Amino acid sequence: MSERLHAGATRAAPALQATPGRTRTLVGGAIGHFIEWYDWSIYGFLAGIFAAQMFPSDDPTASLIASFSVFAIGFLGRPIGAFVLSPLADKYGRRTLLSATIIMAGIGGLVIALCPTYAQIGIAAPILIVAARLLQGFSAGGEYQIAIAFLNEHAGTRNRAFGASPQQVSIGVSVLVATGVASLTTSSLTPEALASWGWRVPFLIGAAMSLFGLYLRRGLAETPAFEKTERGHSVSAVSILTSIAEFPKEVFIVFVIQLNGLQYYLWMIFLPTYANLAGGLDRTSGFVVGILASIAYCIGVPIFAFISDRIGRKPFLIGAAVAFLLFTYPLLSMLAVPALTFGTFAFVAVVGAVFVSLNNAVLGTVFAELFPTRVRASGIGIPYAVCGAIFGGTAPMVATWLQGVGGPLYISLYVMLVCIVTLATHILLTPETRGRPLD
């Protein structure tokens, strides 16, 4: 068996080296995820600024919760996108669908950027925001797993996690860029200008980036693994459900691993808002620290991915769950103090980002290695999107509510419960997938 795997890796490596435009393949595969997370991060960062314009209320906290509710509503589009787009990618190929998802993401960002306020068009304003978020969610429901399949199927067996890591690194880079854009926007404009029009600029930048991403994705080579499968095989709602029923354990593992998206949203998206709510830290300082946390994440992902190609995936999945189980409450408690300092917040944010990178360095490759090529996008996409809609998209809203009810203890208990479920699943069910051939 090991000889066959070694021979497969040897054959895959030259094919990988010979692929024209290898850099374009990596960047083109990852850029959609970059734009997706840029859009979602910008919304999370700036929700507190435009909430009163789109979701007016006498209570600022109520406006913020309403704004984060729309953040969560966007995730409802993900399961729909996963059901529609994933089987199409398994039928017609990864490349075509990746072009479609990036177009939809750009349209959603443009609608948010140009949307009139509640004072101008009344209830139509929040309806337009909801529609744009649903479109972005629909796009994201296909983007993630199709890009995972695309990059992992282009990578060789020996260094698969490292070769596919640009997609996960793109998350950190996107948050880094989004944090930098949000920080520059909030620091360079007056509060009045920021509230009236300045918050729209970052969304316009995201729409422009989607056009560049579409340019990159045109002409990308289809993956070798997909080329070997039978093209045009029948795909229907029944066949999707059949494929899920064929791999129930694998689908459950994807769902549980994706539960850890809760930690990502709390640490990489919500934490600056939490620091402002719990410790009174100004938003600009929160964004600057977010840049440091994103840098730590971007460094950690490829390093841990490279190591996982040598020692396996499970140690990193288990390590991330143990780290958050033990340290979430102590870290969040450090932020819930009067006059929170920049240094304290930086320490908490960077440590949490490293914990997140432990999990994210391997999860995409684990997902790809759990399923055969013929159902890879569908098998990953549906449980991933359903879990993301339930736990990921609601994370900022639920955390805001839990902070008001019980402070950092209640938020920590929520995270710790997820960690316990994750640990039990990895110890009892999750296989070690390192070295598995994708065919």
Image: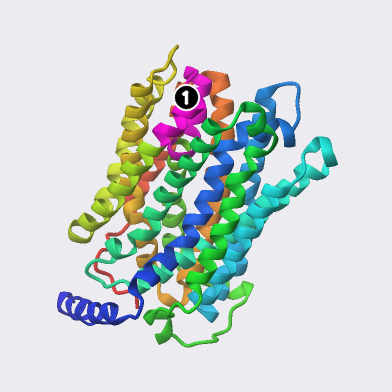
Q: Residue at x 75, y 49 (%)?
A: 128
- Residue 423 appearing in the image: no
Quadrant including the C terminus: bottom left
Q: Is residue 280 magenta?
A: yes
- Helix, strand or loop at label 1? It is helix
Q: How many marks?
A: 1
* Location of residue 150 in the rendering, given as x and y in whole percent from the top left corner: 42, 71
* Location of residue 188 in the rendering, given as x and y in whole percent from the top left corner: 54, 33
Of 309 and 223, nearer the camera is 223
From this view, report whether residue 233 is shown above or below residue 421. below
The majority secondary structure of the magenta stretch comes to helix
Q: Residue at x 37, y 49 (%)?
A: 425
Q: Is residue 295 left or right of residue 128?
A: left
Crowding at mark 1 (Cα within 10 Å: few <14, some 14-19, many 20+)? many
Q: Which residues are magenta?
A: 267-290
Reading the image, the residue beneath label 1 is: 275
Most distant residue in the top direction: 338
- Residue 419 appearing in the image: yes
Which quadrant of the structure image shows residue 13?
Answer: bottom left
Q: Residue at x 62, y 68 (%)?
A: 84
Q: Residue at x 37, y 20 (%)?
A: 334
Quadrant including the N terminus: bottom left
Q: Is residue 319 left or right of residue 230?
A: left
From this view, report whether residue 314 is shown above or below residue 372. above
| Three-letter code for the amino acid on which mark 1 is drawn | Ala
* Location of residue 381 in the rendering, given as x and y in whole percent from the top left corner: 51, 62
From this view, report whether residue 126 is shown above or below residue 81. above
From this view, report whether residue 97 is shown above or below residue 295. below
Q: Is residue 90 magenta?
A: no
